[in-house]
Amino acid sequence: MHLLFLDESGQPNDRMFAVGGLAIRADEWEVVRRRWRDMLDGHGWPADQELKWHGTRSGEVPPDVADAAFRALAEMPVSCFVTVLRPLAGRQSHPDFFASDDDTYATALTFIAERFQRFLAREDSYGVIVLDSRRREVDDRLRRFFERLQESGTPFTQLERIVDSLMMGPSHHSLGLQLADLVVGTTLTAQRAPGDASRWFKQLQPRFARHPDSGEVEGVGLKIFPEKVKGEEAPATKLFDLWSS
């Protein structure tokens, strides 16, 4: 069994928006928890205080602690998945995928779910998706959307290895969601500007899911849509009839 913890970075109406995080095999959870706790203890960071991506940008998280956090993440037995969307460009090329902020979020979640499903099939495993909780009404709507997506599948795959519907939780009660925040924050920022984010993203790249034959990360662990150069994917079935029904 794998747990995929997901968070978002940016806003669905921004020039770039991302949803992503990391998958952890259930029987390796204690390894992840222990390594993170050892890193926090070694740098004097309070165990009950979230180490947030925003804090690495604002200075709340000291540079040496931020560096140690990403080193620890890069050494963990995890598999990262991030979808980076370009909503302004997408509204021109794929309007149904970006018709509203909700549709944009659903697009990102669908791409992640497809890639998680393929990962689970390769691992001969099953999994659940855990999302950072938003507002109750949004959480409920997301659950209903995902239930319908599981029933009908996407235009590219069925989601039979993803167990049940989405699980929601507040990030301050979940180490997995805190780590997802760091993964998706640094990935999105690295696409926009050089600096620490690019350096940390390079550290994390070996942890991103890869194609089993080619070893490619792009299109597997990292999905950028629409691509800056025209890709192969074209507008497909209107997935988001599921969202609004």
Image (cartoon, rainbow, N blue to C red):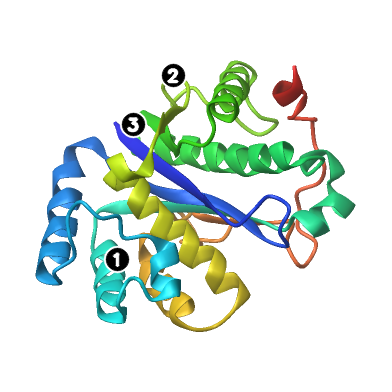
Task: Specify the farthest residue to the right.
Answer: 92
What residue did someone put label 2 on? 164
Mark 3 and mark 1 residues within 8 Å of each other at the beta carbon: no
Tally of numbered tags: 3
* Residue 193 place in picture, x, y as percent: 59, 79
Query: What whole-number distance in Å separates the C-alpha atoms at marks 3 and 1?
Result: 23 Å
Side of 101 where 79 appears, left or right: left
How crowded pointer 1 is (Cα within 10 Å; few <14, some 14-19, many 20+) is rated as: many
Q: Which mark is residue 74?
A: 1
Side of 134 where 228 appears, left or right: right
What residue did someone put label 3 on? 125
Q: Sequence-wise, which precedes: disc 3 or disc 1?
A: 1
> Residue drawn at (56%, 22%), measured in percent from left and top?
140
Q: Sequence-wise, which precedes: disc 3 or disc 2?
A: 3
* Residue 201 place in picture, x, y as percent: 44, 71
> Residue drawn at (56%, 19%), measured in percent from left and top?
147
How crowded pointer 2 is (Cα within 10 Å; few <14, some 14-19, many 20+) is rated as: some
Mark 3 and mark 2 residues within 8 Å of each other at the beta carbon: no
